[in-house]
């Protein structure tokens, strides 16, 4: 018995040693947004360059051991240099000025406006997951599991997602990949934001309509939408079919992270009142790839049910149904889900999928492009079944009993905390 215990504890120590070795096997000097062939980015005069060749980040480079323990994921995409246009804020869209600093828990961002009042956002491609690291992870020295988890995100997913959305007539924020050098237009943010790679895209809030929709009063966030609902009551409804189509599209592209703050709404004036048309943003988690021993354990439905991997078969539908869905879509007839699934299946053709992924630079497509295409096509083919499963899970849930996460500060009565149409 004593020998068995010694062998057991010996195996435990060996496994822990392997885990820690894989966590520590990251570059001694990790960099983001490096200019290829240049040793000192601060000495380059970008005013004489139309484009630069950059890599999103070298932070996720790995060894064989690390790939076994923490997965291959999209490490190669993050480290692959690609050609990107150099952009000065005063030279684009009629000149852009900074309104304020924004950003979530991982992404740095700046909100910008031009002379016409159209609002844009710069969102960093490179992520900083430090705010997500719990104290216990720092104490145990395993914080690199969370930092390294960003490698599961495709750095250029948003580019392909926008093209896919167009194929099924969904609005998007028109993300454009740009390199922003240090410049006067960044003002006090020059040091923190200059010489980096960004998505430049339309903002999901603002008074000026940049879309093709007519009679748009404003672009608002979910919190303001709730307040507008309280003000207008039965005169305001959301475009339910459009939201169902959006959520089924999220399933196709494997975007599992769709909480309230990741949606904007076009508020459209109608004769009888208003319609709110959904606008999805923040596509960081589209095509989310999970492999390797540790990420697979973490992504178990019994550990992190919302962390669903992008693979041909959806393994756990309840993890994809959010409080956001209960709030806006519970009670919507099953037929709407079936109709929208059929629409996506019909319009998201093989040619549309091929064309969307061809928007990536060739060197990026060659890494996992073919695999991603095959998964999209497989999910599309089974979408009617997934739509019914989604609806079944949705209808099994109770209405909310607390404010919708992401719009907690909405000044609305308690009955509007249950669901959008509960007034």
Image (cartoon, rainbow, N blue to C red):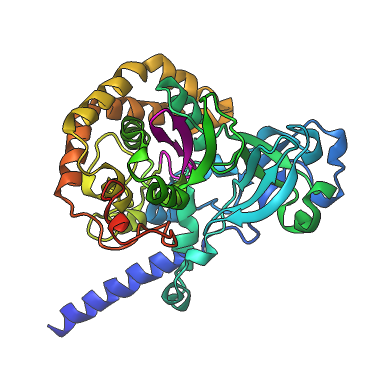
For the magenta stretch, what is the residue range? Answer: 264-287
Above-or-below relation of 267 to 9: above
Q: Residue at x 58, y 34 (%)?
A: 175
Q: Residue at x 61, y 46 (%)?
A: 123
Q: Residue at x 29, y 30 (%)?
A: 379
Report the front residue among 323 and 78.
Answer: 323
Q: Residue at x 33, y 37 (%)?
A: 247
Horizontal and vertical percent position of residue 319: 26, 50
Horizontal and vertical percent position of residue 143: 47, 68
- The quarter holding residue 311 reads top left
- The quarter holding residue 70 reads bottom left
**Residue 279: in magenta span:** yes
Is 303 left or right of 228, judged from the image as shown? left
**Residue that extends furthest to the front in the rendered view of this protein:** 272
**Residue that extends furthest to the bottom in the rendered view of this protein:** 2
Horizontal and vertical percent position of residue 20: 43, 68
**Residue that extends furthest to the left in the rendered view of this protein:** 1
Report the front residue among 89 and 405.
Answer: 405
Horizontal and vertical percent position of residue 371: 39, 30
Total number of numbered labels?
0
Is 221 left or right of 296, judged from the image as shown? right
Q: Please identify the quadrant where the N terminus is shown.
A: bottom left
Report the front residue among 219 and 49.
Answer: 219
Answer yes or no: is residue 195 visible.
yes
**Residue 272: in magenta span:** yes
Most prominent secondary structure in the magenta stretch? Answer: strand
Answer yes or no: is residue 183 visible.
no
Report the front residue among 108 and 205.
Answer: 205
């Amino acid at each position: 018995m004593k020998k068995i215990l010694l062998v057991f504890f010996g195996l435990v120590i060996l496994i822990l040693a392997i885990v820690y070795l894989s966590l520590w096997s990251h570059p001694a000097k990790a960099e983001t947004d490096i200019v290829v062939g240049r040793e000192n980015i601060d000495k380059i005069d970008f005013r004489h360059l139309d484009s630069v060749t950059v890599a999103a980040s070298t932070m996720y480079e790995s060894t064989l051991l690390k790939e076994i323990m923490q997965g291959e994921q999209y490490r190669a995409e993050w480290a692959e240099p690609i050609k990107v246009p150099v952009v000065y804020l005063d030279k684009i869209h009629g000149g852009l000025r900074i309104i304020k600093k924004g950003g979530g828990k991982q992404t740095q961002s700046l909100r910008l406006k031009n002379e016409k009042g159209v609002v844009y956002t710069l969102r960093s491609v490179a992520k900083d997951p430090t705010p997500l690291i719990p104290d216990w992870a720092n104490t145990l020295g395993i914080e690199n599991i969370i930092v390294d988890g960003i490698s599961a995100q495709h750095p250029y997913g948003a580019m392909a997602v926008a093209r896919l959305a167009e194929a099924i007539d969904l609005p998007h924020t028109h993300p454009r990949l740009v390199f922003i050098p240090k410049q006067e237009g960044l003002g006090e943010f020059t040091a923190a934001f200059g010489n980096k790679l960004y998505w430049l895209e339309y903002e999901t809030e603002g008074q000026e309509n940049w879309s093709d929709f007519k009679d748009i009063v404003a672009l608002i966030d979910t919190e303001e939408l709730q307040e507008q609902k309280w003000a207008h009551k039965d005169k305001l409804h959301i475009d339910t079919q459009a939201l169902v189509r959006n959520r089924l599209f999220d399933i196709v592209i494997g975007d599992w992270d769709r909480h309230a703050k990741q949606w904007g709404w076009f508020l459209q004036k109608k004769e009888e009142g208003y319609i709110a048309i959904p606008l999805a943003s923040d596509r960081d988690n589209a095509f989310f790839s999970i492999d390797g021993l540790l990420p697979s354990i973490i992504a178990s439905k019994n550990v992190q049910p919302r962390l669903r991997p992008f693979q041909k078969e959806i393994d756990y539908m309840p993890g994809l149904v959010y409080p956001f869905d209960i709030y806006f879509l519970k009670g919507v007839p099953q037929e709407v889900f079936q109709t929208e699934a059929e629409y996506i299946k019909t319009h998201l053709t093989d040619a549309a999928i091929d064309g969307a992924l061809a928007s990536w630079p060739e060197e990026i497509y060659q890494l996992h492009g073919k695999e991603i295409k095959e998964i999209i096509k497989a999910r599309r083919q089974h979408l009617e079944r997934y739509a019914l499963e989604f609806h079944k899970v949705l209808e099994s849930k109770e209405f909310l009993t607390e404010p919708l996460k992401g719009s907690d500060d909405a000044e609305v009565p308690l009955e509007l905390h249950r669901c959008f149409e509960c007034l």
